[in-house]
DNA sequence: AACCTTCCCTGATGGC
DNA sequence: TGCCATCAGGGAAGGT
């Protein structure tokens, strides 16, 4: 599930591989991921150069000469680049393995393009929860798309004052708040659970039940778990791969997500799973008590690590 | 306005 | 072996 660390890993990979390159040819197939007419998109991006790669929350922004080409990977989206010598070259084939760029399309791959240098980039999305936009580069062009997004947790703009302002007057549960991109952009189901564990907060607690110290703990925990995910190249549970096609490694470092019925690394208690906002939610009932922590927390340590 | 629920979509998985 | 139900979840849309 591509969340901020996964999207940022893809962005960095693309930065190294396609920035400055020109799109020589492209193929698109009708697919619900396109939020613009796919043939129109194709006609507009061919001949354009990749000027920059940016990210806002879970959105990847591929800046072309005249367009912002915005991609959201949804649940299973994969944006990968293969070098010109990456696949078996037949006698009648291009060095990249495709006679025609349209040959790179398949049932789950509605978009493929070739750069002037020979690399081929494809967008694959099995479950079609991804989205592709093409927006003209004019002042405020991305406001419609990004205007409602919340704080950017890894940016220098991320500050406690704004965070507290966002939480003010809210009654929603912590897990729901973290999943809502209007509070903090880029957190998804996995990192929400990890952040709540890191902050020692029960996911079903409400925003208004938090003490000042607890809000500060959550404020700090969010970028902490995202940075860790980024350090390990993202979390791969099933579909996620970076732009090089390689999975991430952060799944090995998760503290609670997917660990229900196993022992908490911190205290040994069995990790529980519940559903909040229709999402599987994992937590340690000892480390993340539902009622507010006592003045003198008495954490029992039954196992190391 | 704030908050919650439903729905989209497909492959993997488990029960029988 | 095959068939069917269930599960996973980001975010838009609809409901309260």
Image (tube, coloured by chain):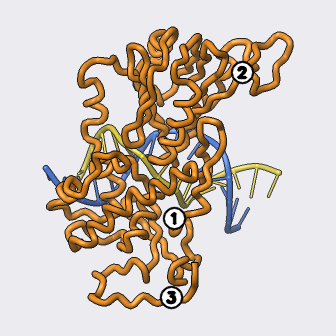
Chain colours: A orange, B blue, C yellow
Distance from the alpha carbon under mark 2 to that under mark 1: 38 Å
Q: Earlier in the sequence, mark 3 or mark 1?
A: 1
A32 and A46: which is toward the camera: A46
Q: Residue under circle 3?
A: A301
Q: Which mark is residue A257?
A: 1
How dense is the environment of label 1, judged by Cα within 10 Å: few (below 14), some, or many (20 and up)?
A: many
Instruction: Please report, as a chain letter, where disc 2 is located.
Output: A
Q: What is the secondary structure assignment of the residue under circle 1? A: loop
Q: Earlier in the sequence, mark 3 or mark 2?
A: 2
Apparent side of residue A129 relative to residue A162 in the rendered image (left or right): right
Q: Considering only order in the chain, which callout, 1 or 2, is on the residue closer to the N terminus? A: 2
Q: Respond whether the residues carrying marks 2 and 1 are from the same subunit.
A: yes
**Image point 42% across, 69% down: which residue?**
A198
- The correct choice, above or below, for A208 with respect to A185 in the image is below
Dot 3 surroundings within 10 Å: few (below 14), some, or many (20 or more)? few
Q: Nearer the viewer, residue A163 or A75?
A: A163
Tell me, for residue A237, which label it has, or none.
Answer: none
């Amino acid at each position: 599930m591509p969340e901020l660390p996964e999207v940022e890993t893809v962005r960095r990979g693309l930065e190294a591989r396609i920035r400055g390159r020109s799109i020589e040819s492209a193929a698109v197939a009708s697919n619900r991921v396109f939020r613009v007419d796919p043939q129109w998109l194709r006609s507009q991006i061919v001949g354009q150069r990749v000027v920059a790669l940016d990210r806002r929350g879970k959105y990847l922004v591929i800046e072309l000469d005249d367009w912002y080409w915005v991609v959201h990977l949804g649940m299973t989206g994969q944006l990968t680049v293969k070098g010109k010598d990456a696949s078996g070259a037949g006698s009648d084939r291009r060095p990249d393995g495709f006679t025609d760029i349209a040959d790179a399309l398949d049932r789950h791959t509605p978009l493929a393009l070739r750069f002037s240098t020979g690399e081929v980039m494809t967008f694959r999305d099995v479950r079609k929860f991804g989205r592709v936009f093409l927006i003209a580069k004019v002042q405020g062009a991305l406001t419609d798309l990004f205007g409602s997004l919340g704080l950017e947790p890894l940016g220098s703009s991320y500050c406690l004052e704004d965070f507290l302002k966002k939480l003010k007057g809210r009654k929603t549960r912590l897990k729901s708040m973290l999943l809502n991109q209007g509070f903090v952009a880029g957190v998804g189901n996995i990192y929400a659970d990890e952040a709540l564990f890191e902050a020692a907060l029960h996911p079903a607690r409400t925003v208004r039940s938090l003490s000042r110290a607890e809000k500060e703990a959550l404020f700090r925990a969010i970028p902490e778990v995202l940075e860790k995910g980024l350090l390990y190249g993202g979390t791969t549970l099933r579909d996620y791969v970076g732009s090089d096609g390689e999975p991430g490694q952060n799944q090995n470092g998760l503290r609670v997500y997917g660990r229900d019925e196993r022992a908490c690394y911190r205290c040994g208690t069995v990790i529980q799973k519940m559903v909040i906002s229709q999402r599987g939610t994992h937590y340690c009932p000892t480390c993340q008590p539902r009622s507010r922590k006592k003045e003198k927390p008495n954490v029992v340590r039954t196992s190391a690590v």
